[in-house]
Amino acid sequence: MNKISVFCIAFFLMSVSAFSQTKINAIKVGDHIDITINKMFFTSYRYSKFEKYPYFYPVNAPSGSSVTSMRNGIWPHHSSLFFGCDDLNGGNFWNKELQGGQIISKREEILENNGARVVIENDCEWERPDAASPIRDKRRITITAPSKEMFQIDFEISLEMLIDVNIDKTNHSLFSARMDPALSVENGGTMIDANGAQGEKENFGKPSPWMDCYGKRGSKIEGMAIMQHPSSSWYPAAWFTRDYGFMSPTPLYWPTDSVATHIKKGEVLQFTYRVLVHSGTHETAKIAEEFKKFEAENHPGIVLKNSRLD
């Protein structure tokens, strides 16, 4: 083996070793938590009382550019990467005025920091004036970096029904992402599910454990995949997709009676999602293989302590 080959192998091993010592940092700044990966800004988890709900923005790819977008000219209420719901007991916890309903953060705590991962807990109450609060939720957010070409957000949420809940048929519901328009199908990007169905025409309304959306910006291809863990309620949910760059795994647009989804007081819904922000295509990023790893993991859900129903 010549000296050049030895040098290349040594450099590669050093690079892998360096990234295996990744340092992820979280810091509270006012009404948000900023997260960096090896000193590169990755995302902010935002929970302002002047917003409808907590959300992540930006969500930066390894290139440093966000794969998500905010306040688009078309459907400006889509806030990057978020969890919400409208048409719930007469309230709207998705868009329009704040008085219609808000998901309000009551507690944010950084549990693990300055190591190979960051773990955040967040307690929220779903509120609107002159109405009983229908839901309280607890979230656990775990941020890691599997490689220098992939960053990961695990978003776990448990929702406790404080009263009987009625959700009219709606496409505005649960975990959702609004992509950067440059990565959308309309602008030459790809949105593909686990079954190989591509674009809104093929994957709208189809159940799938994951969806990936990516495209080319400048000289780089990058995107974001959302996965549902099998332990999640209603798994595998059908996807509400739009070629302009929206994707959301939700059964609430397809209720059993075609009218509404009914959830009894005291019931708890559990969802575990994995978000992979990656360089390359779904094939080069090995999204299908990543899902197999995720599927095999144990995610028992978040225990809701001090239940309002106790």
Image (tube, grey):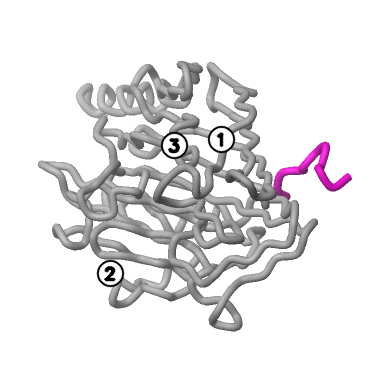
Query: Percent position (x, y) of residue 167?
Result: 58, 66
Would you say residue 59 sits in the magenta stretch? no
Residue holding disc 1: 142
Q: As displayed, is residue 103 above or below residue 253?
A: above
Which amino acid type is marked by label 1?
A: Thr
Quadrant of image for the C terminus? top right
Q: Is residue 237 toward the left or the right of residue 157 in the image?
A: left
Q: As displayed, is residue 297 above or below residue 121?
A: below
Is residue 299 visible from the viewing direction of this image?
no
Q: Earlier in the sequence, mark 2 or mark 1?
A: 1
Is residue 50 visible from the viewing direction of this image?
yes
Dot 3: few (<14), some (14–19), or many (≥20) neighbours within 10 Å?
A: some
* Secondary structure under the numbered disc 3 in the rendered image: loop
Q: Quadrant of residue 283?
A: bottom left
Q: Main secondary structure of the magenta part?
A: loop
Disc marking residue 51: 3
Would you say residue 307 sits in the magenta stretch? yes
- The residue that appears at 54% across and 20% down in the rendered structure is 115
Report the residue that reaches farthest toward the bottom: 257
- The residue that appears at 20% across and 49% down in the rendered structure is 73
**Magenta-highlighted residues:** 298-310
- The residue that appears at 81% across and 43% down in the rendered structure is 308
* Secondary structure under the numbered disc 2 in the rendered image: helix
Disc marking residue 199: 2
- The residue that appears at 35% across and 71% down in the rendered structure is 196
